[in-house]
Image (cartoon, rainbow, N blue to C red):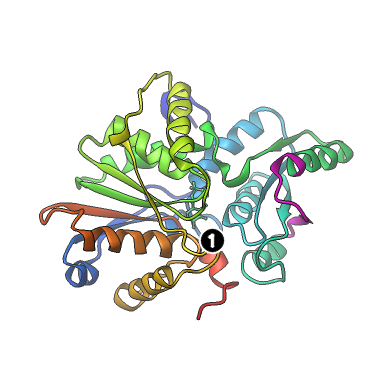
Amino acid sequence: MKGLNNIDKLPLGIFPTPVHRLDHLSERLGIDLWIKRDDLTGAGLGGNKVRKLEYLLAEAKKQGARLIFTTGGAQSNHAMLTAACAGKLGLRTILILKKRGVTECRGNQLLERLMGTEVRFVDTDDYGEIYAEMDRVGQASGLPYYKIPCGGSNALGTLGYVDCAKEISEQGVHFDHIVCAEGSGGTMAGLALGAKLFLPGTQVHGMMVDTDPFDVITPKLMREAAALLGQSVTVADRDYHLMDVCGPGYAVASPEGNAAVGLMAENEGIFLDPVYTGKAFAGLIALAKEGAFQPKERVLFLHSGGAGGLFAVEME
Ligand SMILES: *Cc1c(COP(=O)(O)O)cnc(C)c1O
Protein backbone atom coordinates (compact mmCIF):
# COMPACT_ATOMS: atom_id res chain seq x y z
CA MET A 1 0.00 0.00 0.00
CA LYS A 2 1.16 3.55 -0.71
CA GLY A 3 0.46 6.70 1.28
CA LEU A 4 0.79 10.38 0.43
CA ASN A 5 3.03 11.00 -2.56
CA ASN A 6 3.58 7.26 -3.12
CA ILE A 7 5.43 6.57 0.12
CA ASP A 8 5.33 2.97 1.41
CA LYS A 9 2.74 2.40 4.08
CA LEU A 10 1.26 -0.71 5.71
CA PRO A 11 -2.40 -1.05 6.71
CA LEU A 12 -2.10 -1.55 10.49
CA GLY A 13 -5.21 0.21 11.77
CA ILE A 14 -8.86 0.69 10.87
CA PHE A 15 -9.43 3.99 9.12
CA PRO A 16 -11.11 6.41 8.87
CA THR A 17 -11.68 6.77 12.59
CA PRO A 18 -15.06 8.29 13.52
CA VAL A 19 -15.70 12.01 13.90
CA HIS A 20 -18.77 12.92 15.93
CA ARG A 21 -20.27 15.79 17.90
CA LEU A 22 -20.19 15.83 21.70
CA ASP A 23 -23.71 17.16 22.29
CA HIS A 24 -23.72 17.14 26.06
CA LEU A 25 -20.30 18.74 26.50
CA SER A 26 -21.04 21.27 23.74
CA GLU A 27 -23.99 22.42 25.77
CA ARG A 28 -22.05 22.47 29.03
CA LEU A 29 -19.04 24.33 27.63
CA GLY A 30 -21.06 26.62 25.34
CA ILE A 31 -19.06 25.69 22.23
CA ASP A 32 -19.63 23.49 19.17
CA LEU A 33 -17.42 20.59 20.22
CA TRP A 34 -16.57 17.51 18.15
CA ILE A 35 -14.17 14.63 18.66
CA LYS A 36 -11.89 12.64 16.34
CA ARG A 37 -11.71 9.11 17.69
CA ASP A 38 -8.08 8.13 17.24
CA ASP A 39 -8.55 6.18 20.46
CA LEU A 40 -10.26 3.74 18.06
CA THR A 41 -7.46 3.18 15.55
CA GLY A 42 -7.97 -0.55 15.79
CA ALA A 43 -4.60 -1.90 17.00
CA GLY A 44 -3.69 -2.53 20.64
CA LEU A 45 -6.10 -0.41 22.65
CA GLY A 46 -6.05 2.27 19.96
CA GLY A 47 -4.14 5.53 19.88
CA ASN A 48 -2.27 7.93 17.65
CA LYS A 49 0.94 5.93 17.23
CA VAL A 50 -0.73 3.46 14.86
CA ARG A 51 -0.85 6.09 12.09
CA LYS A 52 2.87 6.78 12.46
CA LEU A 53 3.72 3.09 12.61
CA GLU A 54 2.02 2.47 9.26
CA TYR A 55 4.88 4.44 7.70
CA LEU A 56 7.68 3.53 10.10
CA LEU A 57 7.14 -0.22 9.99
CA ALA A 58 6.71 -0.15 6.20
CA GLU A 59 10.18 1.39 6.03
CA ALA A 60 11.52 -1.20 8.51
CA LYS A 61 10.12 -4.05 6.38
CA LYS A 62 11.49 -2.49 3.21
CA GLN A 63 14.94 -2.39 4.80
CA GLY A 64 14.59 -6.08 5.66
CA ALA A 65 14.42 -5.65 9.44
CA ARG A 66 13.34 -8.62 11.57
CA LEU A 67 13.78 -6.90 14.93
CA ILE A 68 12.27 -3.55 15.96
CA PHE A 69 13.51 -1.31 18.74
CA THR A 70 11.84 1.67 20.27
CA THR A 71 11.90 3.57 23.54
CA GLY A 72 9.91 5.74 25.95
CA GLY A 73 8.93 5.69 29.60
CA ALA A 74 7.77 2.53 31.37
CA GLN A 75 4.13 3.27 30.46
CA SER A 76 4.81 4.46 26.92
CA ASN A 77 1.70 3.97 24.78
CA HIS A 78 3.94 4.28 21.75
CA ALA A 79 6.15 1.39 22.88
CA MET A 80 3.12 -0.84 23.50
CA LEU A 81 1.59 0.00 20.10
CA THR A 82 4.92 -0.58 18.35
CA ALA A 83 5.03 -4.09 19.82
CA ALA A 84 1.37 -4.68 18.88
CA CYS A 85 1.80 -3.53 15.27
CA ALA A 86 5.18 -5.20 14.76
CA GLY A 87 3.74 -8.46 16.10
CA LYS A 88 1.05 -8.42 13.42
CA LEU A 89 3.80 -8.24 10.82
CA GLY A 90 5.74 -11.14 12.33
CA LEU A 91 8.50 -8.84 13.54
CA ARG A 92 10.10 -9.18 16.96
CA THR A 93 10.18 -6.12 19.24
CA ILE A 94 12.61 -5.25 22.01
CA LEU A 95 11.66 -2.20 24.04
CA ILE A 96 14.49 -0.29 25.70
CA LEU A 97 12.52 1.76 28.19
CA LYS A 98 13.51 4.46 30.64
CA LYS A 99 12.99 3.51 34.26
CA ARG A 100 10.35 6.24 34.61
CA GLY A 101 6.79 5.66 35.73
CA VAL A 102 5.11 2.44 36.79
CA THR A 103 7.44 -0.45 35.88
CA GLU A 104 5.34 -3.20 37.53
CA CYS A 105 3.06 -5.44 35.51
CA ARG A 106 0.25 -2.91 35.20
CA GLY A 107 -1.09 -0.78 32.35
CA ASN A 108 1.06 -0.96 29.23
CA GLN A 109 3.53 -3.25 31.03
CA LEU A 110 0.73 -5.79 31.42
CA LEU A 111 -0.20 -5.49 27.73
CA GLU A 112 3.44 -6.05 26.77
CA ARG A 113 3.53 -9.12 29.00
CA LEU A 114 0.44 -10.47 27.21
CA MET A 115 2.13 -9.95 23.84
CA GLY A 116 5.35 -11.60 25.00
CA THR A 117 7.31 -8.43 24.23
CA GLU A 118 10.87 -8.25 25.52
CA VAL A 119 11.25 -5.19 27.76
CA ARG A 120 14.58 -3.93 29.07
CA PHE A 121 14.83 -1.00 31.43
CA VAL A 122 17.76 1.38 31.37
CA ASP A 123 18.46 3.78 34.18
CA THR A 124 19.10 6.82 32.00
CA ASP A 125 17.17 9.60 30.29
CA ASP A 126 19.89 10.13 27.72
CA TYR A 127 18.64 9.12 24.27
CA GLY A 128 22.21 8.82 22.99
CA GLU A 129 22.82 6.07 25.53
CA ILE A 130 19.47 4.44 24.79
CA TYR A 131 20.11 4.29 21.02
CA ALA A 132 23.63 2.96 21.70
CA GLU A 133 22.07 0.20 23.83
CA MET A 134 19.73 -0.65 20.92
CA ASP A 135 22.78 -1.04 18.68
CA ARG A 136 24.53 -3.26 21.22
CA VAL A 137 21.49 -5.51 21.67
CA GLY A 138 20.70 -5.46 17.95
CA GLN A 139 24.21 -6.45 16.91
CA ALA A 140 24.33 -9.20 19.53
CA SER A 141 21.04 -10.62 18.18
CA GLY A 142 22.51 -11.12 14.73
CA LEU A 143 19.19 -10.00 13.22
CA PRO A 144 18.69 -7.05 10.90
CA TYR A 145 17.08 -4.39 13.09
CA TYR A 146 15.35 -1.03 12.81
CA LYS A 147 15.26 1.71 15.45
CA ILE A 148 12.14 3.82 15.89
CA PRO A 149 12.68 7.07 17.81
CA CYS A 150 10.76 7.98 20.94
CA GLY A 151 7.09 8.60 20.09
CA GLY A 152 7.73 7.73 16.44
CA SER A 153 8.23 11.45 15.90
CA ASN A 154 10.54 11.78 12.95
CA ALA A 155 9.57 13.12 9.52
CA LEU A 156 8.31 9.74 8.32
CA GLY A 157 6.13 9.15 11.40
CA THR A 158 4.76 12.67 11.12
CA LEU A 159 3.21 11.71 7.76
CA GLY A 160 0.70 9.62 9.71
CA TYR A 161 -0.90 12.82 10.96
CA VAL A 162 -0.76 14.48 7.57
CA ASP A 163 -2.91 11.49 6.59
CA CYS A 164 -5.20 12.22 9.52
CA ALA A 165 -5.73 15.83 8.38
CA LYS A 166 -6.53 14.58 4.89
CA GLU A 167 -8.95 12.05 6.39
CA ILE A 168 -10.68 14.82 8.37
CA SER A 169 -10.99 16.89 5.16
CA GLU A 170 -12.84 13.95 3.59
CA GLN A 171 -15.27 13.46 6.49
CA GLY A 172 -17.56 16.26 5.39
CA VAL A 173 -17.50 18.70 8.33
CA HIS A 174 -15.40 21.87 8.40
CA PHE A 175 -13.57 22.63 11.64
CA ASP A 176 -12.26 26.06 12.58
CA HIS A 177 -10.01 24.62 15.27
CA ILE A 178 -8.33 21.28 15.96
CA VAL A 179 -6.86 20.68 19.42
CA CYS A 180 -4.40 17.86 20.15
CA ALA A 181 -1.84 16.83 22.77
CA GLU A 182 1.82 17.40 21.94
CA GLY A 183 4.27 14.99 23.60
CA SER A 184 7.03 14.21 21.13
CA GLY A 185 5.69 16.46 18.38
CA GLY A 186 4.79 14.29 15.39
CA THR A 187 1.05 14.39 15.87
CA MET A 188 0.86 18.17 16.11
CA ALA A 189 3.37 18.76 13.31
CA GLY A 190 1.53 16.31 11.03
CA LEU A 191 -1.84 17.93 11.72
CA ALA A 192 -0.45 21.44 11.26
CA LEU A 193 1.22 20.49 7.97
CA GLY A 194 -1.87 18.54 6.92
CA ALA A 195 -4.08 21.53 7.72
CA LYS A 196 -1.88 23.71 5.49
CA LEU A 197 -2.29 21.20 2.67
CA PHE A 198 -5.86 19.94 3.09
CA LEU A 199 -7.79 22.03 5.63
CA PRO A 200 -7.82 25.69 4.64
CA GLY A 201 -9.22 27.85 7.42
CA THR A 202 -8.47 25.36 10.21
CA GLN A 203 -6.19 26.38 13.07
CA VAL A 204 -4.31 23.67 14.94
CA HIS A 205 -3.53 23.98 18.65
CA GLY A 206 -0.86 21.80 20.24
CA MET A 207 -1.24 21.32 23.97
CA MET A 208 2.27 20.73 25.28
CA VAL A 209 2.36 17.98 27.92
CA ASP A 210 6.16 18.01 28.15
CA THR A 211 8.77 20.75 28.40
CA ASP A 212 10.71 20.18 25.16
CA PRO A 213 11.21 23.19 22.83
CA PHE A 214 8.10 22.54 20.71
CA ASP A 215 8.39 25.98 19.11
CA VAL A 216 11.50 24.57 17.40
CA ILE A 217 10.43 20.92 17.07
CA THR A 218 7.02 21.60 15.47
CA PRO A 219 8.10 23.73 12.47
CA LYS A 220 11.18 21.53 11.94
CA LEU A 221 9.09 18.34 11.69
CA MET A 222 6.59 20.17 9.47
CA ARG A 223 9.34 21.16 7.04
CA GLU A 224 11.00 17.73 7.07
CA ALA A 225 7.71 15.89 6.52
CA ALA A 226 6.82 18.30 3.70
CA ALA A 227 10.18 17.54 2.09
CA LEU A 228 9.29 13.80 2.09
CA LEU A 229 6.15 14.80 0.20
CA GLY A 230 8.28 16.69 -2.29
CA GLN A 231 6.98 20.03 -1.08
CA SER A 232 8.87 22.92 0.35
CA VAL A 233 6.71 24.81 2.82
CA THR A 234 7.49 27.97 4.70
CA VAL A 235 6.12 27.63 8.19
CA ALA A 236 4.70 30.84 9.63
CA ASP A 237 3.74 31.54 13.24
CA ARG A 238 0.04 31.42 12.32
CA ASP A 239 0.42 27.82 11.02
CA TYR A 240 0.46 26.37 14.52
CA HIS A 241 -0.43 27.42 18.05
CA LEU A 242 1.14 26.05 21.21
CA MET A 243 -0.08 26.13 24.78
CA ASP A 244 1.65 24.85 27.90
CA VAL A 245 -0.54 22.38 29.80
CA CYS A 246 2.30 20.33 31.32
CA GLY A 247 1.60 21.40 34.92
CA PRO A 248 3.80 19.61 37.46
CA GLY A 249 5.72 17.66 34.80
CA TYR A 250 5.55 15.13 31.99
CA ALA A 251 3.49 12.09 33.03
CA VAL A 252 2.67 13.73 36.37
CA ALA A 253 -1.08 14.29 36.69
CA SER A 254 -2.32 17.88 36.96
CA PRO A 255 -5.51 18.92 38.78
CA GLU A 256 -6.85 20.55 35.58
CA GLY A 257 -6.06 17.45 33.53
CA ASN A 258 -7.73 15.13 36.02
CA ALA A 259 -10.81 17.35 36.12
CA ALA A 260 -10.96 17.24 32.31
CA VAL A 261 -10.71 13.42 32.34
CA GLY A 262 -13.63 13.38 34.78
CA LEU A 263 -15.70 15.86 32.77
CA MET A 264 -15.36 13.82 29.55
CA ALA A 265 -16.08 10.54 31.34
CA GLU A 266 -19.11 11.88 33.20
CA ASN A 267 -20.71 13.72 30.30
CA GLU A 268 -19.83 11.59 27.29
CA GLY A 269 -18.76 8.18 28.60
CA ILE A 270 -15.41 8.58 26.83
CA PHE A 271 -12.17 7.93 28.71
CA LEU A 272 -9.22 10.28 28.40
CA ASP A 273 -5.91 9.72 30.21
CA PRO A 274 -4.15 12.00 32.72
CA VAL A 275 -0.79 12.09 30.86
CA TYR A 276 -1.83 13.33 27.41
CA THR A 277 -5.46 13.65 26.44
CA GLY A 278 -6.77 14.88 29.81
CA LYS A 279 -4.24 17.73 29.89
CA ALA A 280 -4.94 18.51 26.23
CA PHE A 281 -8.66 18.65 26.88
CA ALA A 282 -8.04 20.88 29.91
CA GLY A 283 -6.20 23.21 27.49
CA LEU A 284 -9.20 23.21 25.16
CA ILE A 285 -11.48 24.14 28.07
CA ALA A 286 -9.09 26.96 29.04
CA LEU A 287 -9.18 28.29 25.46
CA ALA A 288 -12.98 28.15 25.48
CA LYS A 289 -13.06 30.11 28.76
CA GLU A 290 -10.66 32.72 27.34
CA GLY A 291 -13.07 33.20 24.44
CA ALA A 292 -10.57 31.89 21.88
CA PHE A 293 -13.41 30.21 19.94
CA GLN A 294 -16.02 32.41 18.25
CA PRO A 295 -19.69 31.45 18.82
CA LYS A 296 -20.25 29.91 15.37
CA GLU A 297 -16.90 28.12 15.23
CA ARG A 298 -16.58 24.35 15.26
CA VAL A 299 -13.89 22.80 17.46
CA LEU A 300 -12.45 19.30 16.96
CA PHE A 301 -10.66 17.55 19.81
CA LEU A 302 -8.26 14.78 18.77
CA HIS A 303 -8.60 11.83 21.13
CA SER A 304 -5.13 10.36 20.69
CA GLY A 305 -5.64 7.30 22.93
CA GLY A 306 -3.83 6.44 26.15
CA ALA A 307 -6.14 3.69 27.41
CA GLY A 308 -3.25 1.34 28.20
CA GLY A 309 -1.63 3.74 30.62
CA LEU A 310 -4.94 4.50 32.32
CA PHE A 311 -4.64 1.32 34.36
CA ALA A 312 -1.29 2.30 35.80
CA VAL A 313 -2.01 5.79 37.09
CA GLU A 314 -2.67 7.07 40.53
CA MET A 315 -5.38 9.73 40.48
CA GLU A 316 -6.32 11.76 43.53
C1 LIG B 1 2.22 9.80 22.29
C2 LIG B 1 0.88 10.30 22.66
C3 LIG B 1 0.49 11.63 22.40
C4 LIG B 1 1.43 12.66 21.85
O1 LIG B 1 1.70 12.51 20.49
P1 LIG B 1 3.11 13.00 19.95
O2 LIG B 1 3.05 12.73 18.51
O3 LIG B 1 4.13 12.18 20.67
O4 LIG B 1 3.28 14.44 20.26
C5 LIG B 1 -0.79 12.01 22.70
N1 LIG B 1 -1.67 11.14 23.26
C6 LIG B 1 -1.32 9.89 23.56
C7 LIG B 1 -2.32 9.02 24.21
C8 LIG B 1 -0.04 9.41 23.26
O5 LIG B 1 0.29 8.15 23.57
Kindly identify which residue carries mark 1: 249
What residue appears at the point 20 percent right and 47 percent down from the top-left corner?
A: 173
| Location of residue 201 with respect to 19 vertically, above or below | above
Q: Position of residue 71 (x, y in %)?
A: 67, 48
Q: Position of residue 17 (x, y in %)?
A: 37, 52
**Drawn side of residue 175 relative to residue 185, left or right:** left
| Location of residue 156 with respect to 308 vertically, above or below | above
Residue type indicated by callout 1: Gly
**Drawn side of residue 45 relative to residue 28, left or right:** right
Where is residue 218, by image quadrant? top left
Q: Residue furthest left?
A: 296
Give 6 or 302, whichever is nearer the viewer. Answer: 302
Residue 300 on the magenta span? no
Give the crowd class for mark 1: few <14, some 14-19, many >=20 residues within 10 Å: few
Q: Residue furthest bottom?
A: 316
Residue 118 on the magenta span? yes
SS state under label 1: loop
**Drawn side of residue 291 relative to residue 96, left or right:** left
Magenta region, residue range: 116-129
| Location of residue 60 with respect to 232 vertically, above or below | below
Q: Position of residue 217 (x, y in %)?
A: 49, 37
**Drawn side of residue 282 relative to residue 127, left or right:** left
Q: Position of residue 133 (x, y in %)?
A: 80, 43
Where is residue 241, by image quadrant? top left
